[in-house]
Image (cartoon, rainbow, N blue to C red):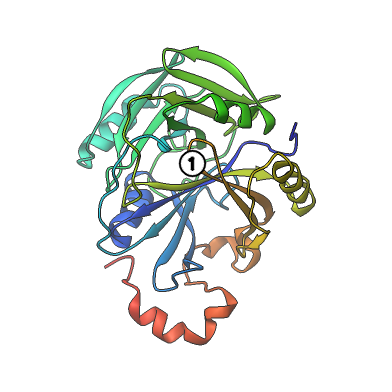
Amino acid sequence: MLQEIKGLHHVTSMASDARVNNAFFTGTLGLRRVKTTVNFDAPDVYHLYYGDEIGTPGSVMTYFPFPNMGPARHGAGEVGTTVFSVPKGALGYWRGRLTAAGVAGLSEGSSFGGKRLDFDGPDGDRFAVLEVEDDRRAPWTGGGVPEDVAIRGFHSVSLRLRDGGATEELLGFMNYERVEQAGAVTRMAVKGGGVAGTIDIETLPGAPAAQLGAGSVHHVAFAVEDRAAQLAVRKAIAETGYQVTPVIDRDYFWAIYFRTPGGVLFEVATNEPGFTRDEDCAHLGEALKLPSRYEHARDRIEAHLEPLAA
């Protein structure tokens, strides 16, 4: 049992337009862009991070916006919906805000007794805001959303799978336990509770295989406190037979990756060192930060990247 895993760290997705993506998350959703950097494997593509004031683990949505990328094909073997936590009574505000912004796919309902509002991102990626009682995380208030209704961070993600049994077993090993079942959806939560600690497994036996594209979640990352905890997790997961990558330095956290039985890519990321390691908190996300191996090419990279605001 991997007690080192404490819940979600971040969720990373694909987009087709950096400027549209930035406007949606910082403007429509009112999150803070806490880091502006580039894809480690494709430095001509941004890697944008959005979250609370300092990018606290469990609050951070990140994107690789590949210009003119084709749309995803949604189906089994992917993250379906990323769900943000908002305070009780906030849904009316969000319904009005998203409607005024012309956001598509609005649908109000409930999830395991909680009121939620589902909606589409710019590339058809699926999101929801869920009313959560007693989420004491401090929201970012610099994005134009009042504090009493602002997003606190993640509540959960859903995994869309043809057969959820093996993934449920894996999550059980990763310190999750089954807490509820509603139809084809199994709710798993980190033992002992905690914020951003929920995973829903949606079983869709006849669904076509998902295909990566704009609007797809590339991977979902789970949080561990530090590198020692990460090494313990890596050893345990590898010993169960999973092919786990070596530890990779992502500048703001260290990461390992492995593919789950249902096809979803999991990451385990450290809470250290965080997004303030190379920028003052007051100016997070303002400057383009490059991995050291690309600093020599800064002029070329900056000339290639589209400005994020007009």
**Label 1 amino acid?**
Val
Height in image: 105 above or below 224? Answer: above
* Residue sitting at x 33%, y 32%: 94
* Residue sitting at x 54%, y 24%: 165
Height in image: 213 above or below 47? Answer: above
The residue where tag 1 is placed is 264
Q: How many marks?
A: 1
* Residue sitting at x 35%, y 49%: 212
Between 207 and 122, the one lying in front of the other is: 207
In the rendered image, which quarter contains the N terminus?
top right
| Residue 7 x/y as whole percent | 62, 36
Residue 5 seen in render? yes
Within 10 Å of disc 1 (Cα), the crowding (few <14, some 14-19, many 20+) is many
| Residue 19 x/y as whole percent | 30, 61
Res. 205 image quadrant: top left
In the rendered image, which quarter contains the C terminus?
bottom left
| Residue 240 x/y as whole percent | 70, 39
Height in image: 187 above or below 292? Answer: above
| Residue 213 x/y as whole percent | 32, 52
Height in image: 31 above or below 130? Answer: below
Q: State the SS at label 1.
A: loop
Residue 133 seen in render? no
Instruction: Report the side of 104 relative to 277 (left or right).
Output: left
Instruction: Report the side of 59 relative to 124 (left or right).
Output: right
* Residue sitting at x 31%, y 34%: 208
